[in-house]
Image (cartoon, rainbow, N blue to C red):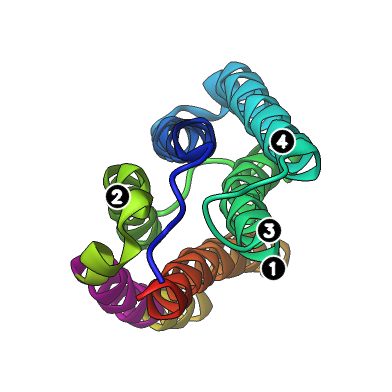
């Protein structure tokens, strides 16, 4: 069964918009990580605004699902896609929040480099997702997307383990280690969330083929 056409542009445009906010959000997260501690607060406010805009799109999609008589594919799948895109955005925002709220000072260069590697994985996940969302009109054509996200998540797993090991061997005070560990774990959860999203796209492709 092919995807039904009725209403598809409205839903797919909103998914694409949601994914573009992920690209903007992870860019701000990278800037927070690179910024001096006294410059991070303003960047976090910008990230919060992007996250709020993403919430609004998520609510709009839910409302459209509830109001639509015919949807491009199963309502539950549409809702799950919107929710998983929102999960990615929430975790990006949470990572930025931790960096600022924990008042983390200058991060040692070796740990900062590895944190940057984790964020780079998320950046590529967000970019791949933003490119893929318009293709939901024909999800079977998105195989390269979910394969690449799976590869990136594996890369993120390796970066996560390496970053934790380096952190625990850094000689920093225990409180700072705990704070940075929280950031590292949120970045890992975000990579997992991108993989969950890609897996949902794959499931939809199978159902619609």
Q: Main secondary structure of the magenta part?
A: helix
For the point 55% across and 59% down, which residue is it? 73
For the point 27% across and 44% down, which residue is it? 131
What element does badge 2 sit on?
Answer: helix
The span picked out in magenta is: 144-159
Q: Badge 1 local density, few (<14 within 10 Å), some, or many (20+)?
A: some
Q: Earlier in the sequence, mark 1 or mark 4?
A: 4
Q: Earlier in the sequence, mark 2 or mark 3?
A: 3
What element does badge 1 sit on?
Answer: helix
Above or below, 177 against 41 in this view is: below
Q: CA distance from mark 4 to mark 2?
A: 20 Å
Disc sitting over residue 18 in the figure: none
Place of residue 165 in the rendered image (x, y in percent of width and height, measured from the top left): 44, 83
Q: 72 or 190: which is nearer to us?
A: 72
Q: 139 or 163: which is nearer to us?
A: 139
Q: CA distance from mark 4 to mark 3?
A: 10 Å
Left/right of residue 10 with respect to residue 131 in the rendered view? right
- Read off the residue under disc 2: 135
Left/right of residue 17 with respect to residue 185 in the rendered view? left
Place of residue 158 in the rendered image (x, y in percent of width and height, measured from the top left): 33, 82
Disc sitting over residue 64 in the figure: 4
How many numbered tags mark residues here? 4
- Read off the residue under disc 3: 75
Q: Badge 3 local density, few (<14 within 10 Å), some, or many (20+)?
A: some
Q: Earlier in the sequence, mark 4 or mark 2?
A: 4
Q: Badge 4 local density, few (<14 within 10 Å), some, or many (20+)?
A: some
What element does badge 3 sit on?
Answer: helix
Q: CA distance from mark 1 to mark 4?
A: 42 Å
- Read off the residue under disc 1: 178
Q: Nearer the viewer, mark 1 or mark 4?
A: 4
Above or below, 41 against 112 in this view is: above
Q: Earlier in the sequence, mark 1 or mark 2?
A: 2
């Amino acid at each position: 069964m092919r995807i039904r056409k009725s209403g598809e542009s409205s839903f797919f445009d909103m998914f694409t918009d949601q994914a573009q906010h992920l690209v903007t959000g992870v860019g701000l997260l990278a800037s927070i990580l690179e910024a001096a501690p006294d410059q991070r607060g303003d960047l976090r406010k910008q990230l919060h605004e992007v996250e709020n805009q993403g919430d609004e799109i998520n609510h709009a999609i839910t409302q459209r699902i509830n109001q639509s008589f015919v949807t491009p594919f199963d309502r539950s799948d549409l809702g799950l896609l919107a929710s998983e895109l929102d999960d990615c955005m929430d975790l990006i925002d949470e990572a930025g929040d931790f960096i600022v709220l924990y008042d983390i000072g200058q991060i040692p260069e070796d740990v900062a480099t590895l944190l940057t590697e984790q964020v780079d994985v998320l950046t590529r996940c967000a970019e791949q997702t933003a490119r893929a969302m318009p293709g939901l009109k024909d999800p079977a054509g998105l195989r390269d997307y979910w394969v690449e996200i799976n590869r990136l998540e594996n890369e993120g797993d390796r970066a996560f383990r390496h970053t934790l090991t380096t952190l625990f061997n850094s000689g920093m005070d225990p409180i700072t280690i705990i704070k940075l560990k929280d950031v590292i774990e949120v970045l890992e959860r975000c990579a997992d969330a991108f993989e969950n999203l890609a897996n949902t796209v794959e499931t939809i492709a199978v159902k619609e083929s």
